[in-house]
Image (cartoon, grey):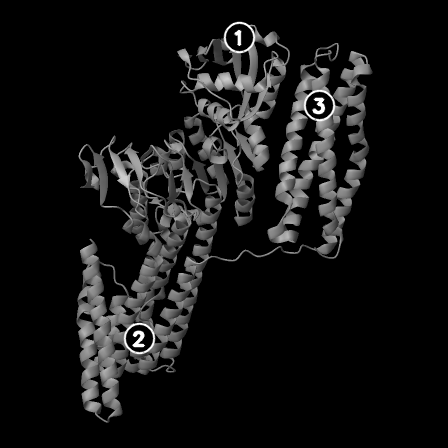
Amino acid sequence: MNRESDSAHGRQGLGVAVATLGLGLGGALSLLGQAHAARWIFASSTVAVLVPTAVKGLGRVVQRQPGVDLLAVLGMGGALLLGEAFAGAVLALMLTGGAALERYAAGRARRELRALVSRTPRSALRLGPSGTEEIPLEQVRPGDVLRVLPGTVIPADGVLVDDGATLDEAALTGESRPVLLPPGAQVRSGGTNAGGPLALRVTVLPSEGTWAGIVRLVRAAEASRPPFVRWADRAARLFVALSLGLAGAAWLFAGPERALAVLVVATPCPLLLAAPAAWTAGLSRAARRGVLVKGGAPLEALAGAKVLLLDKTGTVTRARPQVVAVEPLAGVPADEVLRVAASLEQASFHPYAPALVEEARARGLSLVFPDGVEEVPGQGVRGRVGALRVAVGQQPFVAPAGAAVPGARAVALRNAVEGSSGVYVAIDGVLAGAVVLHDPVRPEAPRAVRALREAGMARIHMVTGDHPDVAELVGDALGVDRVFSQRTPAEKVEVIRRVRQEGPAIMVGDGINDAPALALADVGVAMGARGASAASEAADVVLTADRLDGLVHAVEVARHTRRIARQSVGVGMGLSLLAMAFAAAGYLRPAVGAVLQEGIDVLVLLNALRALGGRRRAGGRRADRGKQAELARGLASEHRVLQPRLAELVSLAAELERLPPSEARLRLQRVREMLERHLLPHELEEQRTAYPVLGQLYGREDPTGLLVQTHQEIRRRVRLFSRWVESLPNEGPGPADLPDLRRALYGLHAVLTLHFAQEEEVYSALEGTGV
């Protein structure tokens, strides 16, 4: 395939050389007064280009796919027959030069894609009993230990042996910063060793690794043709018919020279040159930023998408649990609870185990390896840590009577409200504490969702298999339109079918369970390139950087590319049709028309290559000042109404111990109603109406991201307070409830006071004369 392409390029290069030499030599002879010899040279160079073009054009006619080759053949043949040898030579140069320009544009557009493929290693250094030997990459097998020298590409996926490593993964992710990996860390193929020599134990065949998967994606991208390009091909055939009809009319009413001028101006066609170059340039630009799109068709579908559906775990969250708190429950210090739990978890395969071990090491705790470990899947693990009998897992498993321990109910309630998970720890049969873990939202996710709305996404939803309480918390953090919770993989497919009724849909996921939904969506997007994983294989787009803001870049590239492709084709065809009209009217001679058409081709190709570059985001757009001031006054008025109610939070917290339980319960319920019926609707209305105006006003310095995060914290605290009030007995709070209720009230007051002050400072810009 490559040899055929190189041969075709060689023939095209020879054609350009012959046409250039003929036009240059003929022009020199004309200046020397050798008109006859000049015409002979012009005619010879025209014939040299005409013959192979005619053979190619005849083949397309036989296949019932007449293209611009037919116009070129008629134009050059007509020039020779009418004695317009110079026009024929100019047309020959324009035709071969246009093909060269197209080849240059395609090569320039594919530069990033080809650069990725060219990095594929051909061999590897394998460590064996007799030393290091170089072997072909095809002979590498799982279990082999490879030596990777500085500056060379990682040939296979594996784990680091002995020492850590410094890697440059710019080719994988688009990120230029080096990645520091500890001993035993997973390593993806395709990165570059930016440190000293390293040893790598291979875990999968190179053909099934990360880099092999990326190469397959790139080759699929190069082979794909977007619908817009296929439409351009069909339109080109219509353009040929129109050109022939106009040329025939010009011949009928004004003679063959006018017909020749029309044919010359119509060759070649910007439709065939501009559209493929623009879409390929868009693919290359996306690849430069770690976004692999499987061809022009998915890129074009991405440009037209209106609905976005996000998976939760691993997509909008990190899928790597983190310890957020250690709650001692029986007088055992928090560090001791964590130490014994982490020591036991060293022998566990549970997903939470690495998080506990990592947190213990971060706190500098000394771990010991456990003995007599017994793990019950889905419940927990037990064993001995030194002289202690330790159990870690669900509360009924570690200590069946632990629910009666003071504070255990608070941990369970906190987990239910905050969407966190509690790992309970028992020492010698006594519930000693709980470790609270949380799968955090990706820090870039809220910003990415806002950017995607700005880029044109009409609806953004989230789908997950998690409980509604957990899912709603994450949905609040992101600001999505709807949350589909407790959905199985099969039900996710049904969700895709439903949301596609709202418009062309993008589905973003990261796991095997997301593959069916990714395949059904108009555009499936996989987070991260994990070799031949089901998600990557089913997806149309792969974000190798494993960050959601890569999707923002992909959508922006797709829409920018579509705009440039349409613009290039529209302008090119408009100019060509205008030139044809002038030629038919007798205002353009054939030679001048050929030069003019080449200028049009150069223009549209250069414009198409703009898809390689970015579009600067506009700064903050200033909304109407009158509406801004009116909005600010309305928000300030609402704040004044709510301020006195905030003071009630502090006063109630201070009075709880002195109030009769029944009265305390009544006042707590009133505060809860105020928060849910007045405060939260106010905050949601602000986020819906005021924050977009602030974003336009401040542009790149948009402060609303932090304000949205504060809204998330307010909603979390209100939910926690409401759950406490709901769980109170009918007679009112008891002594054990009062500390938690006071903390909830004081915390709410502090967050709300700070948030109101922040908002009022920001809103002052809406009432002023500038920012």
Q: How many marks?
A: 3
Q: Position of residue 334 (x, y in %)?
A: 58, 19
Residue at 52%, 58% in the rendered image: 616
Pick whichever of labels 1 and 3 is earlier in the sequence: 1
Residue 694 or 361: which is nearer the viewer? 361
Tell me if mark 1 has few (under 14), some (14-19) or many (20+) residues whose alpha carbon lies within 10 angstroms of its own.
Answer: many
Q: Position of residue 100 (x, y in %)?
A: 28, 67
Tell me the CA gap for discs 3 and 2.
83 Å
Give SS at disc 2: helix
Whether pointer 3 and pointer 2 mark residues with C-beta atoms closer than 8 Å, the reply is no
Give SS at disc 3: helix
The disc at residue 399 is 1
Residue position for label 3: 743
Q: Quadrant of the C terminus?
A: bottom right
The disc at residue 264 is 2
Residue at 49%, 17% in the rendered image: 341
Q: Could you tell whether 311 is left or right of 537 in the image?
A: right
| Amino acid type of the residue tagged 3 in the rendering | Arg
Q: Position of residue 260 (x, y in %)?
A: 29, 78
Residue at 71%, 23% in the rendered image: 743
**In this rendering, which labeled residue sits more in front, label 3 or label 2?**
3
Q: Could you tell whether 597 is left or right of 134 in the image?
A: right
Tell me the CA gap for discs 2 and 1.
89 Å
Pick whichever of labels 3 and 2 is earlier in the sequence: 2
| Amino acid type of the residue tagged 2 in the rendering | Val
| Residue 444 at least partly seen | yes
Q: Position of residue 414 (x, y in %)?
A: 61, 21
| Residue 77 sits above or below residue 494 on the image | below
**In this rendering, which labeled residue sits more in front, label 2 or label 1?**
1
Q: Could you tell whether 724 is left or right of 13 in the image?
A: right
| Amino acid type of the residue tagged 1 in the rendering | Ala
